Amino acid sequence: MKRLHQIGTRFVRSGELGKVLQEVVDAAIAITGSDMGNMQLLDNSGELKIVAHRGFEQPFLDFFNLVHEGQAACGTAMKERQRVIVEDIAESAVFTGSPTREVVLASGARAVQSTPLFSRSGYLLGMLSTHYTTQRRPDERDLLLIDMLGQQICDMLERMRMEEGLRKSRDELELRVRERTSELISANEELQKQAALLNLSRDAIFVRGFDHIVKFWNDGAVKLYGISREEALGKVTQDLLRTGFPEPVEQIVDHVLQSGWWEGELRQTASTGEEILVESRWALQRGTDGEPLGFLEINRDITAKKLAEEALRSNMARLEVVNAELQEFAFIAAHDLQEPLRKIQTFCDMAQKRCVPALDNTSRDYLVRVVNSASRMRRLLRDLLEFSRVAARPGPPNKIDLVKIVREAADVFEASVRETGCKIEIENMPAIEADETQMLRLFQNLIGNALKFRGAETPHIKIYGRLDSKRMCEIFVKDNGIGFDPQYAELIFKPFQRLHGRSEYDGTGMGLAICRKIVERHGGSIRVQSEPGKGSTFMIRLPAKQTRLETIIAGQQS
């Protein structure tokens, strides 16, 4: 008993497990009067491994270095979870038929006892075995002492393992603390870098929690609102800036939580009391665990932009009124001037019939020039009146068949077509929404233009169209006429612009100007490609569904 106490005290003082285990083996040998002994502990693979021994040669130690369940006396005790005593190894069924029998006998052992070592919670920790060179059985006193010795070593092992577990836990905790500290330092450095970058922005940028209390306030916010960082931190943004939202703030927060962002316009107030209109963008901020933390808000001052847009809208509205008045004036002027012009032409005709015989050649020439000028003036007024009608009085848009419209326009020139032998080729075209009367005038002008400026060859006019991917109708009017220099491709669409003298080709120079006005009033565009002697191709783009005319008509009605 004294030796057992000494072993426990030595372990507590030294903590050297190997030496203590060897002393346990020696104590077991002395207690039982045995000749040899060993201690085995259970390793991670569930096998018994010798950790201390006395009296055995190397062949025995190598063979029994790892013992499986059911092997020899110790393996059998491990399997049955109770002590095994073999009084005669040579005759025992525990060793019969097993290679362990010869190895044990070769070591000089003739009897053995193996006592399992259990923790107080019932877990098998190892095995304590003593061997005898003669056949014998330990008495009960020896076995009781072995049990006491075994329980003591089990308690020591359990305490050691607990201390080892605590040491590992402490080391792991210290490692995690160091890692977390390093992460926090890195995160803090990264936050400082981000804060420095955010401070470089001219936009107002601030971070706030779900309680809308400001946690970060950049230099841009200081400049925009005139509120220092110290004044802003810890304040509720809505109260600080007297924010006016386009919708309830709760709905905005719900949108950010669902989609991760929100953008819109806010009305806020600077420290001076000046109202500011900002373009605001919100982004949801999340922690490292993915949980929402708050919002990053970026605000850009668009007050000046909005004032400029409002001024532009006001100027555009005034311009629309002026244009409408000018168009109405042009319409009225062109209409009202026709009556005095008709009288001038009528009296000139009467003068030609009655006075020509009494006039000399010079006077007759003057009279002819007056009549021709009056006729030309009348045509100019008529075209100007038509131009004003296109600009000021569009009809309601309807779905029209372009092929049908083009054929009707071509029928107007039936006599010219027959006279020149012109071939007008009309291919399939999509239906679109448009003012039917203006579309008819558009194609009449383009076909008439192609017939007027025909070349030496038999005239050939090809008209076709298609829908593009943007639901725009592309229409092509191609001829083989005289063409013109590409530098005049824009000039020919201006009012009263002519590339040829009146002696070469009749006209007022308003036809293509009316075409452009019709197309633009429909929200489209027209351009032309041409070369001298190689004909011309007019390219028209019109929306398949009309909104431009509806807007113009609604504006005129209002």
Image: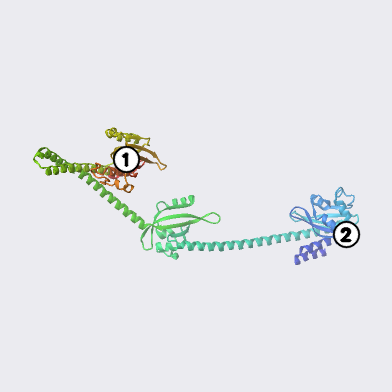
Label 2 element class: loop
- Among the two numbered marks 2 and 1 on one chain, the one whose residue lies closer to the N terminus: 2
Q: Nearer the viewer, residue 27 or 218?
A: 218
Q: Which residue is mark 1?
A: 481
Q: Position of residue 116 (x, y in %)?
A: 80, 54
Q: Which residue is mark 2?
A: 35
Q: Which numbered circle lies on residue 386? A: none
Q: Position of residue 544 (x, y in %)?
A: 37, 40
Rounded to the nearest angstrom, the CA distance separating label 2 from label 1 is 129 Å
At label 2, counting other C-alpha atoms closer than 10 Å, the crowd grade (few under 14, some 14-19, many 20 or more) is: some
Q: Nearer the viewer, residue 396 or 262?
A: 396
Q: Decide if residue 442 is on the left or right side of residue 195.
A: left
Quadrant that contains the C terminus: top left
Q: Position of residue 2 (x, y in %)?
A: 82, 65
Colour basis: rainbow
Label 1 element class: loop
Q: Decide if residue 129 is on the left or right side of residue 239.
A: right
- For badge 1, the amino acid type reads Gly
